[in-house]
Amino acid sequence: MDDFRRAPHRFLNRLFSSEDTNLTDLVAGNVTADSVWDLADPGGTLTGVEHIIEGFVRPLKTALAHVRRRDELFIGGPNRRAPGGHWIASVTHYVGNFTAPLFGVTPSNHLVFFRSGEFYRVEPDGRISEAKILFDLLDLMRQAGRFPLPNVMGTEMLFPGPATHDGVLPDSGVDGSKTLDLCEAMLADLKDFDPNDFSSKGQTGVDGYWHDDMLWYGPGGIGSNYRWSGFENDHRAGFLTAFPDRVGGNHYCRIGDGNYAAVSGWPSMTMTHKGDYLGEPASGKSLTLRVMDFYRCADGKIMENWVLLDYIHLFRQMGRDLIAESNASGTPR
């Protein structure tokens, strides 16, 4: 197979780089007729060309004036998980002036960088037959000055590209399968933890999976952090206290590409809400969580990890509508 990453990269950027009036022809030429795209809550499932245009493309073009796509990562590889095939994984921002509501979120009339994690299955003819798109609506609310949750422990920030500046269509000559091997081994050991200090086997130290200077870029509601100590303090301890029986790794896609790897589950996690979390008292409810993880590795260590979580969907399962709360009680800039 030729470099199957390039045609989807051109297509997805063209969607948001021109005032193309014939979107139907553009989309129809690059997705299969029965293509199914699952969007983060409240986007739902879109099937076929017109639904993809009306449910994905037009909302972004309408809400974000002169919107452009700005990729930070764009990688691809053969999928180790069923249903197999070749997949693309991307971390991107949709950049524009937020001048009209988007998925119910009230606009700010200012510049926003609307982050999104995206996975696409690419057929041998280069067309996209399946997509999972996880928008970070909580971070959009933060940028608009209407954040509905308490202050987070981590640092809320724009997702940076990789420190090596080579995350878009990487061509390093590194075997991506070995990068994915490292990430899979880390995930296997991360499942079990000591409830006293939240440590897991083999994560840190000389022989650990993570580099001492690891950077973990978390989504809205969590924020980003530096080094394992920051990750534990700003995210892991609170999450495991709230969801101590969480089980992850239910992935539909795992790919490696050079020094990069990406995995995603829809949902990936099942868990019980046993402790307070981000201001929400323990409910005892069984919950699921949609997850996307993107990794950069070097010299046998994980250096950077970008994480997207569907927290709108998670909190809806707890009985809360964060979009409505943001619109009702947030304080705009």
Image: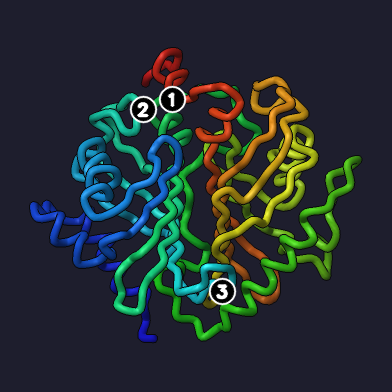
Q: Is residue 297 above or below residue 234?
A: below
> Are discs 3 and 2 less than 8 Å apart at CB?
no
**Residue at screen point 41% across, 35% down:** 42
**Dot 1: what SS?**
helix
Q: Answer with the quarter of the image where residue 11 lies.
A: bottom left
Point out the image quarter for the N terminus: bottom left
Point out the image quarter for the C terminus: top left
Mark 3 vs mark 2: give the one in front.
2
What is the crowding at mark 2: few (fewer than 14 residues within 10 Å), some, or many (at least 20)? many
Visible residue check, residue 190: yes
Return the residue at label 2: 105
**The residue under label 1 is which amino acid type?**
Ile
Q: Is residue 114 left or right of residue 17?
A: right
Return the residue at label 1: 323
Q: Is residue 95 above or below residue 26?
A: above
**The residue under label 2 is which amino acid type?**
Val
Label whose residue precedes the other's in the sequence (3 or 2) = 2
Return the residue at label 3: 259
Label whose residue precedes the other's in the sequence (1 or 3) = 3
